[in-house]
Image: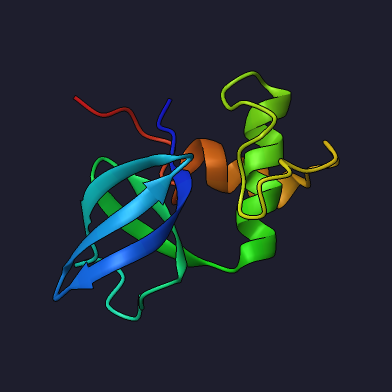
Amino acid sequence: MCLAVPAKIVELDGTSATVDLHGNRVQISTLLTPEARLGDWVLVHAGFSIQHLDEAAAAETFSILADVGLAGPAGGPSGGGGNGSGGGAKKAVAAGAGGGGGRHA
């Protein structure tokens, strides 16, 4: 299974960015999301931002990840983690990150 997680862009230089990933600073490529701007939330997988998110979707995804034990309760856009009432659409985004469903070598 592939997993993509929300991260907030805190530095941007061309197609390279530094994101805040649940309290960690990580370097990623924004080549696949050219619309991404400083301060935006993106879904990150394998070092690439693969989807633009709004803050509510990022919070919901963190809540879902916390529900399944993949993120701590303090993680999330506003630091609160969420109330555990995640929706099905974001479960697909968090787990599948693009809906391909295929296995990766």
Please tell me in which quadrant of the rendered image residue 34 appears.
bottom left
Q: Residue at x 55, y 48 (%)?
A: 93
Display colour scheme: rainbow
- Quarter containing the N terminus: top left
Q: Please state the horizontal and vertical placement of residue 73, each as a whole percent of the image.
A: 70, 29
In the image, farthest residue toward the top? 69
Please tell me in which quadrant of the rendered image residue 83 appears.
top right
Q: Residue at x 65, y 59 (%)?
A: 57
Q: Please state the horizontal and vertical placement of residue 28, each as a whole percent of the image.
A: 22, 52
Count the labels in the image: 0
Indicate left or right for 49 with 40 as reference: left
* Vertical side of 95 occupied by 77: above or below: below
Q: Residue at x 62, y 64 (%)?
A: 55
**79 and 70: which is toward the camera:** 79
Q: Please state the horizontal and vertical placement of residue 50, each as a whole percent of the image.
A: 35, 58
* Vertical side of 82 occupied by 102: above or below: above
**88 and 84: which is toward the camera:** 84
- Quarter containing the C terminus: top left
* Vertical side of 89 occupied by 103: above or below: above
Q: Residue at x 45, y 71 (%)?
A: 40
Please tell me in which quadrant of the rendered image residue 74 appears.
top right
Indicate left or right for 104 with 88 as reference: left
Indicate left or right for 80 with 85 as reference: left
